[in-house]
């Protein structure tokens, strides 16, 4: 969904009542894109988010398994006599299991973030290219991106700087 602005024409170029319109310049077409809405409604975004949720759920399940195993092993260690060879062996096993769990947590979290960032950046580029193509084919001079576009964000100038000139 592209929220396109109205054709902008400064008041000084507006024809006076009864004046000929022939010398007035063509309206300048400027567009505004509500990126949040485009991204939310994009099919690829939905698919990526679904895939990300599956990956995240697998990560959570594995971390929960590690937590449960560590908790069970920790409780069994508490039941053992202090300093016994059996307890020392279980403490070593606990430390190794904790190290494996910590390594898994770190590497899998990095994989999740890498997936999210890489795929969303690719999608952002695709969306920008589509918007640029649309803008060129429909005579827009410039298109602004904002996370969301409303009167307040435009008036407060919080809309990002011009992302690209369509005819550049």
Image (spheres, helix red, strand yellow):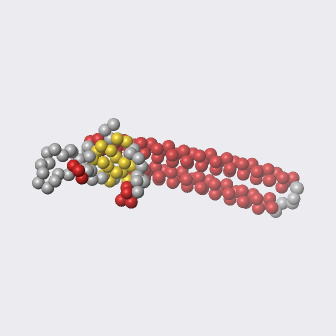
Q: Residue furthest top?
A: 168
Vertical position of residue 127 compared to residue 153: above or below? above
Q: Is residue 42 visible?
A: no
Residue appearing at x 60%, y 56% in the figure:
61
Residue appearing at x 34%, y 41% in the figure:
165
Residue appearing at x 42%, y 45% in the figure:
124
Q: How many marks?
A: 0
Residue 158: x %, y % from top left: 42, 54
When asked about the image quadrant of residue 66, the answer is: bottom right
When asked about the image quadrant of residue 155, the answer is: bottom left
Q: Is residue 59 left or right of residue 79?
A: left
Residue 92: x %, y % from top left: 79, 50
Towards the viewer: 48 or 166: 166
Q: Is residue 134 left or right of residue 81?
A: left
Towards the viewer: 5 or 111: 5
Residue 86: x %, y % from top left: 84, 54
Q: Is residue 103 visible?
A: yes
Quarter of the image with the C terminus in it: top left
Q: Is residue 29 left or right of residue 149?
A: left
Residue 133: x %, y % from top left: 31, 41
Q: Residue furthest right?
A: 83
Residue appearing at x 37%, y 42% in the figure:
164
Towards the viewer: 2 or 111: 2
């Amino acid at each position: 969904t592209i929220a396109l602005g109205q054709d902008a024409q400064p008041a000084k170029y507006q024809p006076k009542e009864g004046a000929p319109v022939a010398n007035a310049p063509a309206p300048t077409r400027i567009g505004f894109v509500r990126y949040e809405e485009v991204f939310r409604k994009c099919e690829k975004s939905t698919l990526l988010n679904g895939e990300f949720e599956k990956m995240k759920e697998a990560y959570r399940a594995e971390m929960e398994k590690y937590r449960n195993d560590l908790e069970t092993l920790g409780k069994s260690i508490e039941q053992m006599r202090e300093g016994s060879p059996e307890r020392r062996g279980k403490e070593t096993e606990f430390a190794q299991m904790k190290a494996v769990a910590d390594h898994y947590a770190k590497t899998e979290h990095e994989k999740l973030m890498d997936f999210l960032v890489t795929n969303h950046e690719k999608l952002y580029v695709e969306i920008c290219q589509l918007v640029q193509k649309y803008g060129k084919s429909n005579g827009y001079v410039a298109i602004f991106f904002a996370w969301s576009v409303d009167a307040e964000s435009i008036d407060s100038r919080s809309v990002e700087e011009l992302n690209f000139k369509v005819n550049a």
